[in-house]
Amino acid sequence: MTAEPLLQVRRLSKLYDIRQGLFSRLVGHVRAVDDVSFDIGTSEVLGLAGESGSGKTTIGRSVLRLVEPTSGSIRFEGKEVTAFDRPQLRDFRRSAQIVFQDPYASIDPTMSVGDAIAEPLRVQGLASRSEIPDRVEKLLTDVALPADFARRRPSDLSGGQRQRVVIARALAVGPRFIVADEPVSALDVSIQAQIISLLEDLKSRLGLAMLFISHDLAVMEYLSDRIAVVYLGKLMEIGPSRDVVATPKHPYTEALISAVPDPSSRRKRIILKGDVPSPVSPPSGCVFRTRCPYALPDCAAAVPATREVRPGHFKACIRDDIL
Ligand code: ADP
Ligand code: MG
């Protein structure tokens, strides 16, 4: 990684208000993200894993300020994103884009594919009318779609083709960073690999950095340089992709990986006990302790510090005698 990371997230927290009744009385908070820190380097892909409800989307949207963080610092190329005013945010939207899970909801069905891809160029004033056709053709090529797709309607396209259009639209403004929030989860398994390899290609060809969000560790391993694992809004483990998958250091990561089907492996499936606790009143100390097969009484006492257990590989767990 370079001396200054592209994105630096420090102690990010997000509480959502819970309101009830006729007068919308504040009755509590959902602790969606709690004290999460990580960096993403230039051209680096960080995979963000964790079960549904663990705070991945909130983290992804917070770093782009599509959600207002409750506290913490987000620096992009050294600038504090949480302090951006409207014009600065507008500039930031050219550097950092998002791709959502559902390609059907992400494109206006009444627009042609070409107009959908050109829209961000027009909104941001990045191309004149006469330049637009060439730019659209180039963007379609970037996502490996034929140029004549510009005239098609989104309804004519398959899910995978639509997701390519969504990616082309995100690329239109020339971003250096993309948050991809479960970009393949809505697609057939056979199509997933094609989109992943497109993202890999964009990373190496355009030098794009990415926060790649997925609940599926198998999907992200190939694309990600490093993987971060979250549970109930807390960062459990972060490290080089291969290390995290081959030799996880946190019991939660171990359980997640044991759930990935792998016929060649004899590792045992770890079935976690109980349900995910409510993020309205998470457990004291380590939030994972109520389901952890290795929990000790001490795990309830204090939030475990994030410690480096191998070069570049960190975990938030007090136990050293396991894994
Ligand atoms: P993930 O993407 O990992 O599934 P989310 O970030 O979507 O996780 O959600 C984290 C937690 O925050 C969940 O408990 C979810 O129900 C809650 N949450 C998400 N968005 C809101 C919201 N707008 N208002 C209240 N709670 C929310
Ligand atoms: Mg999500």
Image (spheres, helix red, strand yellow):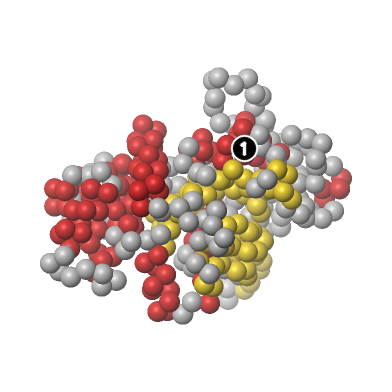
Residue 257, horizontal then vertical, whole percent: 60, 34
- Name the residue carrying label 1: 243
Return the x and y of residue 280 as percentages of the image width and height: 67, 59
At horizontal 22% and vertical 62% (from top left) the residue drawn is: 118
Task: Please say whether residue 190 is visible from this viewpoint.
Answer: yes
Q: Position of residue 244 (x, y in %)?
A: 62, 39
Label 1: how many Cα within 10 Å (few below 14, some 14–19, many 20+):
some
Q: Nearer the viewer, residue 278 or 228?
A: 228
From the Cβ of disc 1, is ligand 1 less than 8 Å away? no
- Is 243 placed left or right of 301 in the picture? left
Q: Position of residue 95 (x, y in %)?
A: 40, 65
Q: Residue at x 59, y 31 (%)?
A: 259
Between 281 and 319, the residue placed more toward the observer is 319
Furthest-right residue in view? 297
Q: Is residue 267 left or right of residue 209?
A: right
Quarter of the image where the C terminus is located:
top right
Q: Image point 66% across, 37% down: which residue?
A: 248
Locate residue 112: give its quadrant. bottom left
Q: Nearer the viewer, residue 284 or 131?
A: 131
Secondary structure type for disc 1: helix
Visible in this render: residue 58?
Answer: no
Amino acid under label 1? Asp
For residue 123, what is the image quadrant?
bottom left
Residue in the picture at 36% in, 31% down:
190
- Tell me: residue 42, above or below residue 239: below
227 vs 132: above or below? above
